[in-house]
Amino acid sequence: MATSAQRGDASHRRPTIDDVARLAGVGRGTVSRVINGGHNVRPAVRDAVNEAIDALGYSVNQSARNLARGRTGSIAYIISERGDRLFEDPNFGLFARTFSRQLRGSGRHLLITTAEDEEEENSLGDYLAVGHVDGALLALPHQGEPLLKRLMASRLPLVVLGKPVDTDEQERCSWVGIDDEAAAYGVANYLLAQGRWPIATVTGPLATSSGRGRLAGFRRALGRQFRQNLVVQGDWSSQSGYLGTKDLLECHPTLAGLFVASDLMASGAMRALRDSGRLVPEEVAVAGFDDSPAALMTDPQLTTVRHPFEETALEAVRILNDRLGGRAAGPEQLLLPTEFVIRGSA
Amino acid sequence: MATSAQRGDASHRRPTIDDVARLAGVGRGTVSRVINGGHNVRPAVRDAVNEAIDALGYSVNQSARNLARGRTGSIAYIISERGDRLFEDPNFGLFARTFSRQLRGSGRHLLITTAEDEEEENSLGDYLAVGHVDGALLALPHQGEPLLKRLMASRLPLVVLGKPVDTDEQERCSWVGIDDEAAAYGVANYLLAQGRWPIATVTGPLATSSGRGRLAGFRRALGRQFRQNLVVQGDWSSQSGYLGTKDLLECHPTLAGLFVASDLMASGAMRALRDSGRLVPEEVAVAGFDDSPAALMTDPQLTTVRHPFEETALEAVRILNDRLGGRAAGPEQLLLPTEFVIRGSA
DNA sequence: CTGAAAGCGCTAACAA
DNA sequence: TTGTTAGCGCTTTCAG
């Protein structure tokens, strides 16, 4: 009866490498060589194969190739933000761009994936753990998100952007981050050294290590003068910076200095101060964090801390590549240097 | 010599379905059934298989499954924006969210991919055409981008978000958009009916059909009063709205009405007007487009046109699903209704 | 330089 | 309900 070899009537299925081989009158292996660079193939044969490929409209079946090669050529960039905040942060774009460019060098492709809630995280975790991608880059995780643990349990090569929250994760994962605590300490001290008082802070989400670290630095700088009412929590959004600052002003009408844990939030803070008739920096000095594009769009421009986003991305890809290449003795952690940038706001 | 069956020493390779079958003492097919829902398997056997799976830490090899099934379960959301504008638009996030949620219903996963320049577009085109994904959703394309043509030439099921620029593409692709021309005509007429003159416009990129359509509507409303110097081109960014409006004011100091082709640009326009000491809406009436979150953040809030983003996303997924399911007689095009929203700015 | 053949790990049709 | 078997389409030795 019909063996598989015989059902090869030119029906409507996608052409395979065998169809090409048959048409070109060569073996299957030769076609494979041609579509993989054409090395070690006589030019005449190569041309014949290419002609057959064009004639048939052939293109390789990626699933088959993945199976045979044992890898997919795809890397996931995982963003697990909730709701509206997805993509609000311009750094996502910068990261994505840098990854994409960098990965192309090693013939890999970047796939951006998102998870908004636990259910999506689990579904995404399955998807990734199961071999859809060769590796993953994970945007700064929040405490309590199950995804990181899920991925660590799988064998998926992984690099986290920013320091994970749990110490266990900090030790067993690869990640690249900055010393948030030290940088924030420096900023707060700078404000203090100007004789400003009281000085307050709008923090990032305290479920992130960055949010915590920056608050810890602020707190250490203030020492015994620290009071809990000098702190209000934001969520990285401009909006939260605005509202937080309004609250702070209400509690401390004589506020003289403000450390805002991100430039985006600081831009909101600047609006709040202007709306309340405060002069920056004369009456209240404002410092941000990140040195993102938002820092240049306020008036005056923001004094801030340069967060080396691009270097972070580059190093993350390098580390991931090492792990993918099999040359990786255990997790690698990296703390990149920051830089204090003085502009008009403080 | 060693046949494949014998090299099964518990070495360090990932466990396969055969390992599980052997350990559980069942056939391979049974294991397959269990990992695909466990229907038609006796409970006792199912448990045994699941135990073996846990014991071995088995998880399916996605590439093999894809090959056997002939599909991948992944859908691409393609964003081909240049540079910084990547992700600046909050609608990207809204689209991504809606897609993701909607796709999960049919067991598929959303992969976001980006292309910044022609080289990346080509590389991405190869990647997608070659079977990495089952289908694709393409964000509003710009004229001259090779990606759409590339994808149309492949057999990849595809739905475009917004109307393509070329008529050929409009006819041969599936897409879902709005009637930009008619909506813009309505807005401009509304301004005119208030007796405002002169009225000008900041357009979107004229390489997009939305940019063009909205300008065309404006132009038709003005009729013989139209002058080229009432038009300045933006790029959807807030920044470009600001700069464009500044230019317009210079040329038309008595400007009385302004139609800005997106709310994001309109927010920039409002800043420019305030910086120039113009009162909105008393001295100049401003209308935006999209009814995006930005429309509520200006003071006064923006009069605008509601762009049904979410419905667009839902319909796009529906159309794509139809095409994936094989039930699709040719391309499907959809024009969704818009709605004029009157707020404080005009 | 080239063809043949042995897998890659899984699904699905078939027979039992 | 279950095991067996024939592919899915490609890469990669291995001979020649």
Image (cartoon, coloured by chain):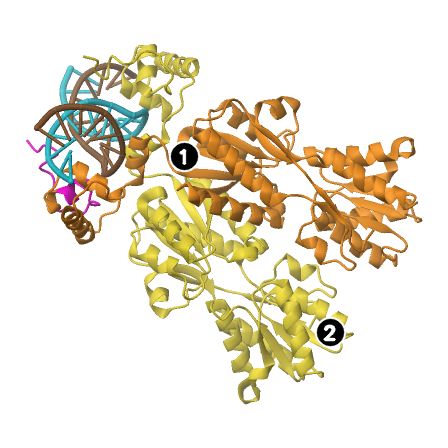
Chain colours: A yellow, B orange, C brown, D cyan
The reply to whether residue B174 is visible in this rendering is yes
Residue A31, given in percent of the width and then of the height, sits at: 32, 19
Which quadrant holds residue A294? bottom right
B95 w.r.t. A148: above or below? above
Which x, y percent locates residue A146? 38, 60
Give the extent of the magenta segment: B1-21
The stretch drawn in magenta includes residue B20? yes
Q: Do the residues labelled 1 and 2 touch (CB within 8 Å)?
A: no
Quadrant of image for the N terminus of chain B? top left
Report the disc number at residue A281: 2
Q: Does the magenta stretch include residue B129?
A: no
Q: In this view, does B31 lie to the left or right of B153?
A: left
Q: How far apart are marks 1 and 2 (CA)?
A: 54 Å
| Mark 2: amino acid | Pro
Where disc 2 sits, the SS reads loop
* Depicted A16 relative to depicted B106: above or below: above
Q: Residues within 10 Å of mark 1 (few under 14, many from 20)?
A: many
In the image, B205 versus B96, the foreground residue is: B96
Disc number placed over residue B168 in the picture, else none: none
* Residue placed under numbered mark 1 in the picture: B132
To which chain does the residue with label 1 belong? B
Judged left or right of residue A145, residue B84 is right
Residue B325 vertical placement versus B187 (above, below):
above
Q: Residues within 10 Å of mark 2 (few under 14, many from 20)?
A: some
Residue for point 60% across, 81% down:
A230
In front: mark 1 or mark 2? 1
